[in-house]
Amino acid sequence: MKNAVKKTGYLFASLLTLTLLACGGYTTVNLGGAVSGLITSGLVISNAGQSLAVPINATTYVFPKQIDDHGTYAITIDAQPPRLTCMISGAAGTTTGIAINTANIYCSLNAYTVGGSITGLTSEGLSLTNGADNLTIAGSTSLFTMPTPVSDGSVYGVAILSQPAGQTCTLKNGTSTMGSAAVTNIAITCI
């Protein structure tokens, strides 16, 4: 009798093991990834109708509801946070039996151009600077834009680096804090 019980136990354990192997392991998996540069709140992402607000300064995220194994996913950004642009690498794919933790979010500060108008410039040699960013202006130019955009929230300070030959130029509105749009109100007057 003991041998029959023992054989039945082995048979049951073998059947249970085969059943689990036939299932292929997990039926659902987590979906998420790393987050970098998220310094403001307001980022909302979604996958298959499930939305997730990613909190400020988050370094990782995981959707609360797991997704089906061997199913597809396609994460989208529903709302960008203020002052930032976020992108997702590895946002779409098919699950393979393990958690997806490589749909990484990268956020960076928005940057805008700094420029304005020039009146009275008739000769060559006018040069402007904004930190390490320099620009030489051709004679008779009426509009200018510095070559390198400035990040939202950063201070800019456009100044005259060199005067044009035979003229003196003055500059107004050259220093401020970058907002959420291009600066076009710097005024240079040359006499």
Image: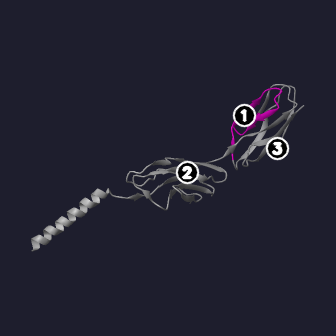
Indicate left or right for 160 with 35 as reference.
right
Disc number lying in front (3 or 1): 3
Name the residue carrying label 3: 173
Mark toward the start of the polypeptide (1 vs 2)? 2
Calculate the distance from the C-alpha at mark 2 to the C-alpha at mark 3: 40 Å
Q: Amino acid at mark 2?
A: Thr
Q: Amino acid at mark 1?
A: Asn
Q: Nearer the viewer, residue 114 or 46?
A: 46
Q: Please, what secondary structure does the residue beneath circle 1 have?
A: strand
* Region in magenta: 128-151
Q: Please, what secondary structure does the residue beneath circle 3 have?
A: loop
Q: Position of residue 161 (x, y in %)?
A: 78, 34
Indicate left or right for 96 with 78 as reference.
left
Name the mark on residue 134. 1
Name the residue carrying label 2: 76
Which residue is rendered at x = 79% and y = 41% of the image?
Answer: 184
Calculate the distance from the C-alpha at mark 1 to the C-alpha at mark 2: 39 Å
- How many residues crowd around disc 2 within 10 Å: few (fewer than 14), some, or many (20 or more)? some
Tell me the quarter of the picture where residue 120 sits: top right
